[in-house]
Image: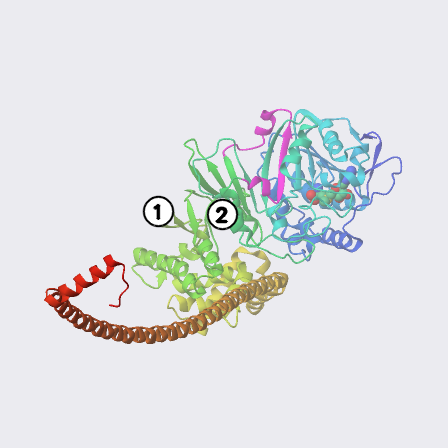
Amino acid sequence: MQYPEDFHQDSVANIWLPRQEESAFLYSDGGEAEAYLEHCLKQASDLSCHSLELTSSIRDWPSEYHLSPKRSNLLRPLQLNHCRNVLELGAGCGAITRYLGENLPKVVAVEGSRKRAELAALRCRDLANVEIVCGQFQDLTFSEKFDVVTLIGVLEYSESFIQAVNPYQKAIEIAKQNLAADGILIVAIENKLGLKYFAGCSEDHTRVLFDGIEGYNTGQSLRTFGKKELEILLQSTDLDYFHFLYPFPDYKLPDVLFTLPEKQPGQIEPFLYQWLSYNNSQDYSHQPLELFQELLVAKQIEANGFLPQMSNSFLILASQSPASINQYLNSNCLVWKFSVMNRLHKFMSQVTLTSNSEQKLIVTKEPLYPDVTTSATETEAGLKHYPKIQSKFFAGVTVMELLVKAIRNKTSTVEASLKYPLETWYNFLVQEANRTLGSATEIPGIYVDCGPGNLIVTTSGKVEYVDQEWCFTEKLPIKFVLFRCLIYIHQKIYPWIDLHLDESLSDKSLPSFILFCFQLISLDITPEEFRDFLAREWIFQKQINPLLKTVSFDDYVRGVYSKTESLLVAKAPYRLWFQLYNTRKELQQTQANWEQTQSQLHQAQSQLHQLQQTQSQLQQTQSQLQQTQSQLQQTQANWEQTQSQLQQTQANWEQTQSQLQQTQSQLQQNQATITGMESSKFWKLRQGWFRLKQSLGLKGDD
Ligand SMILES: C[S@@+](CC[C@H](N)C(=O)[O-])C[C@H]1O[C@@H](n2cnc3c(N)ncnc32)[C@H](O)[C@@H]1O
């Protein structure tokens, strides 16, 4: 079908319909949600992107998605001034169509669902440059080419509506076919590997926890991609040049967008994470688990160079030439941050972080609508707003980060760790009060917003107060500055306070928290001061936030208190998870103790065994000893016996000796006798006689 030739305009709904009846297109937020949106749009007299009327009608996720002024933040970083026409594929209920219509000469918005096309037309009913076409974009051809074609929150549904081998590639090809030669394609889509999905947010479309990061297992005909996959997809359609921007918390309701230019600034420490919120990302279908503090994890991811790969969403500009992309972006800009909620139109602002020619980082705060905010304005209640502020970027950590880390610190008491950042903050206020007014208790009105989020402890240890947007003409009590900032600290870091201050604070209500912090820096706060400070804050907020215009003081106070109570309810899954985590930790500790006890038992048992062995050896040794002793006694007895035998032998020997001597002397005596006898005459005669008898052969007696 050719547009506009094959279409006719429905003058009641103010949409373009195909002349030939089309089959129904099944995409809906649900009948009730769309009926409510229709009611809001019909009632509203201000349909603009920043409409307060529409903002005040937000009551749930679908109405927030369609009516929040944050929706436009996605495209605010783009310089669209030279763009002549845009083709929006999948316009939904017209949130982005409205922004395009307010900023471009011609918008053709295609939406498959008749109901949603009508809602988009209702949203843009006062914009003559917007044409809403009801039809499926894969069935359409256009008689003109477009400078910009968008697929915002649409590419992921390709498989549901487009018949093709690769429906995702097909969707991009269709978008490309409608581009002018130097045109750009704008794609916005969630990153299936986004940090928030690891932190426990369910997948935005399938609503299943970890579905995207596990590669989609629910069998539904839709999916998102990681960065590399998207790059390959774009290249497959010959869109070889692309530039990624990283919207946080996501492309749907972005507060901040980053980009990383090819030429990195001189800054080496992580600094992009500081632009993220201390509130974890929203889970659009369940209460998020909040398994960790996303900002703290983002810092570590950035330090290791893969923050782009883990951005929750992407905004991609793709084209066939780099020059086409460059004309839509300020190449020096690294960060855009927008403040559009709860503010009067004239106070809505954007902060950018740019890198100048010397690679130095500059922070600039400017009004989003300069035509309604030309110079510093002062309200009746003596509040001044400075619309344009510029300063150098101070590298360091905010006192807020120190506070969050202190609350999570489990190695010392929370009191001890909280004391340091609170004192850093308080001492800075006292020092400035003294320097400017010579006072210890009062400070000039420019310090009204001097809270931990706006205080940077630089790398050289100096404290710098940044973002001085608001100023009271009167001086203020330091205690009021502390008090008002503690309200927002309490709201921002409530889940952590709730869990990590558990032993320190029995009652974690806002008043107890404020009192607790005051006591940590040795200050008191009376009930009268408490009420007076709340009243001052109410006056302050009423001048900024038009939604408070009709709210009474008591309702405002109830709102402040109930906000933290509702946060308490909202954070229930996180608390459960945390308790589980703690229980598991205790269990692990118990198990470790048990294992230690068991090993001690084993050790004791083996020692006992050794002892028994030693005892038996001892007994054995003892019996051996006894045996040796008895042997010794025996030996001794033997020795004694031998000794006595020896003595006896000796005595015998001596006796024998004496007998021998006696015998010897007798022998000598006998010898002498014999010798005497032999020499006698008788003996000689006798001898002669014998010899004679012998010679005669006679036998004879002696
Ligand atoms: C998640 S919504 C996003 C709407 C809008 N771009 C926004 O950001 O508010 C996706 C829209 O794209 C529409 N859509 C998806 N595929 C389409 C197709 N092939 N043709 C026409 N509309 C389509 C759906 O009907 C739905 O309204």
Question: x%, y% of residue 125?
Answer: 73, 43
Q: Residue at x 72, y 51 (%)?
A: 41
Under tag 1, what secondary structure?
A: loop
Which residue is drawn at the image coordinates 50% and 47% (left, top)? 299
Q: Quadrant of residue 448?
A: bottom left
Mark 1 sits on what residue?
Answer: 460
Label ID, residue 344? none
Task: Count how many numbered circles sit on residues in the image.
Answer: 2
What segment carries the magenta color? 306-332
SS class, disc 2: helix
- The answer to whether the residue bearing label 2 lies less than 8 angstroms from the nearest atom of ligand 1 is no
Q: Is residue 641 above or below residue 281?
A: below
Q: CA distance from mark 1 to mark 2?
A: 18 Å
Image x and y of residue 638, in percent: 34, 74
Label 2: which residue? 274
Amino acid under disc 1:
Ser
Q: Is residue 509 visible?
A: yes
| Front in this rendered view, residue 694 or 507 | 694
Residue at image location 62% in from the left, 65% down from the top:
569
Q: Residue furthest front?
A: 696
Q: Is residue 132 magenta?
A: no
Which quadrant is home to the N terminus?
top right
Residue 163 position by quadrant = top right
Q: Is residue 259 left or right of residue 459?
A: right
* 540 or 698, nearer to the observer: 698
- The kind of residue tagged 2 is Gln
Residue 428 placed where, x, y %?
Answer: 36, 56
Q: Quadrant of ligand 1?
A: top right
Magenta span contains residue 323: yes
* Residue neighbourhood size for the residue with mark 2, other residues' Cα within 10 Å, grouped as few (<14), some (14–19), many (≥20): some
| Residue 550 image position (x, y, % from top left) | 60, 62
